[in-house]
């Protein structure tokens, strides 16, 4: 039977049972169910002579079957439904537990990362002492061990240093409060008969002393001050002293006072008699055209920042006018004797005016930066008085740099210009611009337009992120930096970290299968194919345009974190290894780097690369930037290469600044301000080494200890021989730099917060002589220095 009819105008039929009428609540679905019109069904019934009685009998029969089926289904489905509800509740519980487990695993991973150095050292040390290991393997293992230990040792040294300072703090504070109380009482007595100028001179010092006593809550000293203090003394209130004081004293002893606030600390400071009053009309005199740009820069500061009338003149100021005089001269014996005197300067503040003298224009500009830090950062409410002072100053290193990674996250041109202003304030003279990465290509290249039209954009889900700099914008940045005597050093990553470029031109890779700009951080296996000549044609064309845009004598080519997986499987790369007679893929990378170096050298450019370029050997003229600790830099310096130190332990500003949960930055590492200030690009010689405990000595595996006055063991200044640089090798250290990587920094405000005030600390490490490094003095000056951060609208981490 294939047809049936129902009294309600629609009938359903099954393939072998009787006719089934539709229930009032809808059709019951059976195999091969068919719905037909009522007239067709009635005709079919008549043809088969089926009566209503038969239909009703069949209906009752099927109703019983249906009722039985429903009961059986309920018997089966009810426990299944209950089980499903239970499983749902169980899964919800498991999900919450998995979230808890994941959080616990994150914390465990962090702990494991912190202990990895110690564990690695232990295993390597055991291997090194094994009698089965040959001597060459032992030497290699010890070098690896010291590389892994370096960061841990430096952190331990810093912790021990801070512990010693904390242990001595109570005694020092007691002496400080005693001296402060008696000094304040004596000053108060003298103020009653003092002249107004003397009164203003002592006001800031007096309030500072009062606030120190109140801050530490010494009740006896505070009571003594309260008895002798005038009722209108500003320090008795809860307000904090202004960061920019009208009267800015220098130190008689040569150590800068907190109020002076010059960072980095000058080489020599001497106070002389008298005061200089800054007039409302300031004329900046310059004696030649070379110093005109610096004179205009200073005039702009007086006009825009301090809102004073100012002008520049190619002559002495008009008769009776107060001037700031800029002078270039070769007859400056105090500067000639300094090592890097092209950036050195003399600053003299006298009652009749201010003079800045230098051998070269760059020195004049550095002198102006020190002068600006003696002036208010905002328009003064009262007249500005400066104590007469003589400063002779010059840098310790020629390379004082700061890296900004725009490959991971793009930053606007106005932000770059603002960043350059902050570098100039700190006498930073190199801006390392990291322009290309796996996650983005940021530089316009006319010969390869897809690098920016496609390679500057990465996609994660439905979100597109990108941005790039046109060649005109690059020229603007380079010009702005040059006006501030900052050299812009571009970095074009090769042979690794090139995912964005390979996504645009996949034929340059070993596989030819790269199609998308990577959106994930980390190290990617796809790199430039070293076996294809087209790779070097592409790179030489790109570098040719880069050299046209950047007049710097340096080009950074990266060279770091280049996996060899693709090269090992690539027939062209293996053929290249055979053609060039190379040992392995590491020497293939060395050959790759050498070929690029020769191309740059022919165009009078110096190549810089991260310390991985040492693997397999490098050209003699290559400059090594050591980031994986300092051992790579030491080795390069001993081999005669110029070196720039930027170890992660002191110079990576993407690291968090504290253990607070809301602190931005990379979760796996921390770099507080104290550790930045402990940085020294040249490792100390044995008699200059930082004191270390016996545990620290044991962790190095070498060195002797000697008893100390307090009965403990210290300081084994005897570093392993391969760590020590003689005078000739130490001269190969050009300096150091900060690195602001941006995997964990996505906006400009966070970039500033992660940079300041840590950049201030690093600037002092690479400019000031070692004997000028004083942590307490630096912090005191920094608290005054931050007024420039506020005036420049820079985000910064609060000090103290």
Image: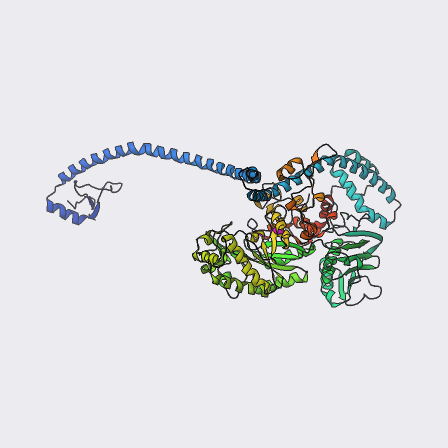
Q: Which residues are magenta?
A: 736-747
Identified at 50% across, 53% down, the residue is 583
User: Taking 567 as reference, is 191 above or below it?
Assistant: above
Residue 559 located left or right of residue 368: left
The answer to which quarter of the image holds residue 708 is top right
User: Taking 691 as reference, is 643 above or below it?
Assistant: below
Residue 7 located left or right of residue 307: left
Instruction: Give the camera-side residue of 202 and 483.
Output: 483
Q: Is residue 739 magenta?
A: yes
* x and y percentages locating residue 526 in the rendered image: 47, 54
Q: Is residue 411 magenta?
A: no
* x and y percentages locating residue 23 in the rendered image: 24, 40
Snapshot colouring? rainbow
Quadrant of the snapshot with the C terminus: top right
Instruction: Using the rendered image of the protein, determine whether residue 273 is visible from the camera's viewpoint.
Output: yes
* x and y percentages locating residue 686 in the rendered image: 70, 43
Residue 756 located left or right of residue 90: right
User: Taking 704 as reference, is 797 above or below it?
Assistant: below
Quadrant of the snapshot with the N terminus: top left
In the displayed orientation, state which residue is furthest to the right: 193
* x and y percentages locating residue 736 in the rendered image: 65, 52
Instruction: Give the camera-side residue of 239 and 141.
Output: 141
User: Taking 104 as reference, is 548 above or below it?
Assistant: below
């Amino acid at each position: 039977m294939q047809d049936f009819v129902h009294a309600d105008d629609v009938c359903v039929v099954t393939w072998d049972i009787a006719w089934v009428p539709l229930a009032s609540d809808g059709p019951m679905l059976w195999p091969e169910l068919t719905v037909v019109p009522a007239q067709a069904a009635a005709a079919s019934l008549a043809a088969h002579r089926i009566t209503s009685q038969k239909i009703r009998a069949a209906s009752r029969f099927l109703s019983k079957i249906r009722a039985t089926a429903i009961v059986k289904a309920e018997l089966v489905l009810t426990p299944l439904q209950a089980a499903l509800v239970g499983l749902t509740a169980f899964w919800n519980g498991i999900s919450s537990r998995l979230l808890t487990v994941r959080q616990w695993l994150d914390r465990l991973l962090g702990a494991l990362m912190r202990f990895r150095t110690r564990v690695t050292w232990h295993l390597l040390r055991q291997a090194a002492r094994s009698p089965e290991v040959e001597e060459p393997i032992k030497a290699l293992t010890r070098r690896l061990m010291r590389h892994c230990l370096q960061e841990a040792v430096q952190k331990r040294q810093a912790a021990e240093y801070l512990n010693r300072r904390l242990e001595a703090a109570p005694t020092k504070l007691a002496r400080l409060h005693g001296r402060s109380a008696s000094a304040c009482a004596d000053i108060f007595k003298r103020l009653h008969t003092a002249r107004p100028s003397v009164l203003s001179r002592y006001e800031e010092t007096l309030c500072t002393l009062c606030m120190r006593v109140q801050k530490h809550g010494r009740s006896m000293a505070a009571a003594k001050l309260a008895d002798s203090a005038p009722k209108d003394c500003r320090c008795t209130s809860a307000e904090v002293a202004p960061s920019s004081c009208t009267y800015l004293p220098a130190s008689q002893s040569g150590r800068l006072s907190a109020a002076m606030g010059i960072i980095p600390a000058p080489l020599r400071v001497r106070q002389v008699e008298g005061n200089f009053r800054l007039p409302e009309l300031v004329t900046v005199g310059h004696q030649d055209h070379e110093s005109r740009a610096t004179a205009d820069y200073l005039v702009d500061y007086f006009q825009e920042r301090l809102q004073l009338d100012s002008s520049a003149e190619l002559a002495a100021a008009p008769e009776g006018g107060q001037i700031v005089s800029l002078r270039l001269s070769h007859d400056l014996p105090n500067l000639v004797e300094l090592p890097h005197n092209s950036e050195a300067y003399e600053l003299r503040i006298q009652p009749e005016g201010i003079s800045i003298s230098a051998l070269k224009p760059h020195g004049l500009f550095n002198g102006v930066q020190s002068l600006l830090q003696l002036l208010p950062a905002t328009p003064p409410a009262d007249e500005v008085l400066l104590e007469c002072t003589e400063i002779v100053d010059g840098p310790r290193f020629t390379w004082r740099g700061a890296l900004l990674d725009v490959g991971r996250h793009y930053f606007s041109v106005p932000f770059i210009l603002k960043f350059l202003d902050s570098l100039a304030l700190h006498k930073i003279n190199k801006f390392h611009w990291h322009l290309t990465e796996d996650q983005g290509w940021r530089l316009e290249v006319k010969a390869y337009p897809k690098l920016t039209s496609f390679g500057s954009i990465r996609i994660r889900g439905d979100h597109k992120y990108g941005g790039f700099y046109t060649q005109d914008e690059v020229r603007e940045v380079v010009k702005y930096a040059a006006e501030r005597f900052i050299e812009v050093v571009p970095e074009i990553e090769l042979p690794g970290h090139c995912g964005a470029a390979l996504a645009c031109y996949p034929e340059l890779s070993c596989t030819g299968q790269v199609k998308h700009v990577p959106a994930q951080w980390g190290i990617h296996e796809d790199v430039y194919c070293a076996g294809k000549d087209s790779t070097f044609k592409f790179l030489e064309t790109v570098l040719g345009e880069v050299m046209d845009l950047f007049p710097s004598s340096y080009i950074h080519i990266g060279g770091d974190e280049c996996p060899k997986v693709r090269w090992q499987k690539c027939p062209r790369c293996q053929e290249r290894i055979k053609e060039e007679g190379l040992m392995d893929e590491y020497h293939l990378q060395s050959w790759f780097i050498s070929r690029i170096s020769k191309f740059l050298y022919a165009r009078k450019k110096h190549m810089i690369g991260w310390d991985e370029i040492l693997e397999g050997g490098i050209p003699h003229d290559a400059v090594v930037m050591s980031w994986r600790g300092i051992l790579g830099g030491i080795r390069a310096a001993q081999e005669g290469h110029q070196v720039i130190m930027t170890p992660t332990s002191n110079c990576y500003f993407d690291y968090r600044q504290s253990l607070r949960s809301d602190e931005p930055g990379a979760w796996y590492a921390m770099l507080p301000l104290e550790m930045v200030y402990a940085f020294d690009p040249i490792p100390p010689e044995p008699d200059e080494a930082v004191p270390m405990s016996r545990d620290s000595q044991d962790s190095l595996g070498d060195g002797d200890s000697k008893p100390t006055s307090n009965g403990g063991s210290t300081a084994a200044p005897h570093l392993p021989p391969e760590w020590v640089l003689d005078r000739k090798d130490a001269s190969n250290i050009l300096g150091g730099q900060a690195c602001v990587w941006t995997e964990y920094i996505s906006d400009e405000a966070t970039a500033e917060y992660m940079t300041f005030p840590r950049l201030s600390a690093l600037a002092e490490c690479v400019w000031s002589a070692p004997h000028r490094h004083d942590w307490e003095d630096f912090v005191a000056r920094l608290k005054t220095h931050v007024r420039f951060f506020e005036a420049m609208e820079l985000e910064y981490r609060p000090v103290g």
